[in-house]
Image: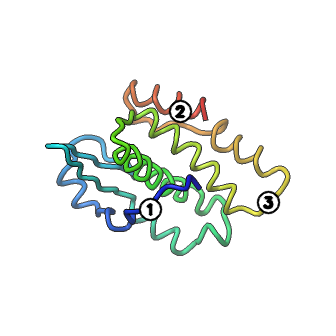
Amino acid sequence: MYRLDATACVDDFVIDAATRDAVVASRRPREQLLVSEDDGGMAIALFVDPAAVSNLARNDPARALGDHNLGDFLLAIEGVSHFVYTLACARADRPVSQLELELQAEVDKYVTCLLVTAPERTMSARLRRRLFGDCELLDDLDGDERDRYQAANDNA
């Protein structure tokens, strides 16, 4: 969508729950981008809940997108969006904020869902309402996370 040079395949950076849990001591959401910088280098890994990936394999969003797979599809899009945006910023030697990552992911979720659904006249409005109007934030977010997610959602 953004005409970025694809030099990394996200599949090569996906880690399992055991690997993620060995590194992360804090909150463990169903999707998580792990980034570590040192000596001018960057290590990156993406965790996406295996149950979500399995559901998407069984219920391909390209065939039908609905209540049975939308949540998992959004989860996967968010992870890939974070991965791609982080790499694009790293290549440009530009820092990235967590708010930028969340805002870009909100836009990517909306655009990607539009691209995989049948083009109906009312789809855009219904999708915006579902993604940005009817969303609920997770209960385990701290105040800063809640503010960041809400700001990204409001601005998207």
Q: Earlier in the sequence, mark 2 or mark 1?
A: 1
Q: Quadrant of residue 49?
A: bottom left
Task: Answer left or right for 41 relative to 70.
Answer: left
Front-lying residue, 145 or 86 = 86
Q: Which mark is residue 119?
A: 3
Going by the numbered disc 2, the residue's amino acid type is Ala
User: Residue 139: x, y in percent?
Assistant: 44, 35
Task: Answer left or right for 117 relative to 46.
Answer: right
Residue at (78% x, 52% y) in the render = 123
Going by the numbered disc 3, the residue's amino acid type is Pro
Task: Answer left or right for 9 relative to 134.
Answer: left
Query: From what the image shows, is residue 6 above or below residue 125?
Result: below
Front-lying residue, 11 or 61 = 11
Outermost left residue: 39
Give neighbour class at mark 3: few <14, some 14-19, many 20+ (Cα, 10 Å).
few
Q: Disc 2 and disc 3: Cα gap in Å?
A: 26 Å
Q: Nearer the viewer, mark 2 or mark 1?
A: 1
Front-lying residue, 127 or 69 = 127
**If the image is split into quadrants, where does the C terminus sit?**
top right
Q: Is residue 38 visible?
A: no
Q: Which residue is mark 1?
A: 6
User: Residue 138: x, y in percent?
Assistant: 46, 38
Q: Disc 1 and disc 3: Cα gap in Å?
A: 27 Å
Q: Which residue is mark 2?
A: 152
